[in-house]
Structure formats: C-alpha cells, structure tokens
Image (tube, rainbow, N blue to C red):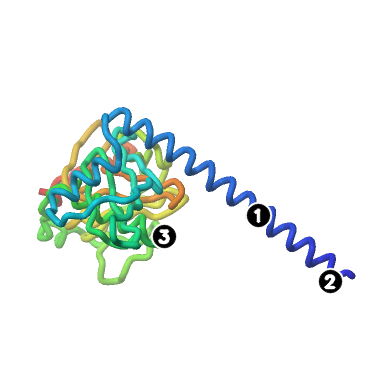
Amino acid sequence: MEGVLIGIVLLAAAGIGLGIGLLLRKLIFRGINKAAAEYEAKHGTTFEAEMQRYIDTLNQGFKIKKIRPMTRFKYRNDELLCFVMRFKIEGKGTNFLGIVSDSGTRTEFKAYELSIFLSDAMELLQKLYRLPKREIDTEYLKYLPRLQNENKFDIPEDEKIVFNTKVKTFELDKGKPLGSKAKFTMTERRIFVYNGFGTWRINLAEDIAALEQGPNSIKIVLAELCLFGTVEVPRLASEFTFTFFDEDFARFAEIINNTVK
C-alpha cells in the first residue's frame, strides 16, 4: 500500500510539473506570436513573404509551405529585433531554420534542430551583422610587465596578465547594467570580466570593431554579436561599456589605446 501511495504521489507530481511546463510554453509562444504580429504590422509584410522573397533571390524554385516564429531576441538596446523561424517548403518534409530580422532575412536550408537552433540562428545573424575588426599592436603588449592573477580567472600560464582591477560599472549596449565592482583582467590576448553571475571574455584580435572613450569609461564595440541568456529568453549585445574608478582609468586607457589600432 505504501509503495502504491508513493507511486501515486510521484505520478501526481510529474503531472503537475508537466502541466506547469506546458503552461509556461504556452505563455512564451503567446508572447512570441504577439510580438510577431506587431513586427509584421510595423513592417507592412509577413514572415512568409519576407522569407519567400529571400528564397526567390537564390533562384532555386522553392516555395514556402508553412512558417512559424519559434523565439525572438532583441539587441542594441532593444532597437532591433530578430525572429528565429521554423519553416517547410513544398515537396519536402524537413523543418528548416531561418531568421527574419531588422538586419535582414536569411536561411541556408539547415534542418531545424531544437537543441542547437539558437546557435545556428546566431551564425546566420552574424553573417548579416559582422563589422570589420581592429588591428592589435602585439609588440606594445610584449613590453608590458607580467602581473599576478589577482582576480583568479582560469588563464593559461603562457598568457601574460597586464592589467587587473574591479570596474565601477559594467554595461551592455546603451546603459543596460550587468553589475558593479565586477572583476576585470586583461591579458595580451583577452579581456576577462566576472560580474558575479558569469564570466565574459573579449578576444582582442577577433572581437573588437571600435573603441570609444568617455569620462572614466571605455566602450568596446564588438565585431560580432554576443549571445547570452537562455533559450527561452535569449539576449544579444553589440557593445560593452566599462566605467573605472579614478585611479585605474588612466592606466587602462593608456594600455587599450596603444593596443587597439
């Protein structure tokens, strides 16, 4: 009897968990569908028409049979939107992945797979967004003194640390805060930042498109969009701004301005 009772309780708990999951999924898709309708109304078109227009430029004769937005994310301070689409074409049973965004529409007819669709979508978006990366002066970095790993980042022994601090504020895009007094370390290859929730890494040779200096702050414009968050609530960033305490700013500005050309 006790075993049966435990089984009933476990079954009930599983049912409740499934019900909550289905409810959350329904609410998520309700939000996506509402945003999709607003996007189509604003642009005076439909996702099907936009994707079909792009496919027609490929001159392959494919016709869309069914299309559905699966998730969306915002970037550049919520100014631009990207919708990840799942669609079928006539004569084929495969679900394909594509994007319709304020930066453009694109598909490479890659199969839509739930476990990796977000990273696949990012690859498409990067091809629309990518900015030229800046040149790095590695010779300058060679002559900077090697520092200790004060912030305890996982950095290989052959990677030289040239700057350590805690930044006053850490923000993405136009003023969206990611934390204060975040740990900040620069090596001759990368910048590491830990804000208490996760570690962010900026590759000096690959990730930097521009620098902008403000009062005690340095903004780094990214050559490629940075994806973070979750599958349910994905987020993108195109730039980071670090505000330094007075005693650190002059030193970091000297290093970064002599490194990024």
Q: Position of residue 156 (x, y in %)?
A: 31, 70
Which badge, 3 or 2, comes first in the chain's sequence? 2
Tell me the residue at 43%/53% (across/down): 198
Q: Is residue 255 visible?
A: no
Q: Which residue is mark 2?
A: 3
Q: Nearer the viewer, residue 125 or 185?
A: 125
Q: Residues at badges 1 and 2 in contact (C-beta under 8 Å)?
A: no
**Whole-number angstrom distance, CA of label 3 to CA of label 1:** 21 Å
Figure check: 87 above or below 237 = below
**What residue appears at the point 16 percent right and 43 percent down from the top-left corner?**
210
Q: Tell me how many marks there are.
A: 3
Q: Is residue 188 left or right of residue 21?
A: left
Secondary structure found at label 2: helix
Kind of residue at badge 1: Gly
Where residue 59 sits, quadrant-wise, is: bottom left
Q: Is 160 drawn above or below residue 192 in the view shown?
A: below
Mark number, residue 17: 1
Mark 1 → mark 2, Cα distance in angstroms: 21 Å
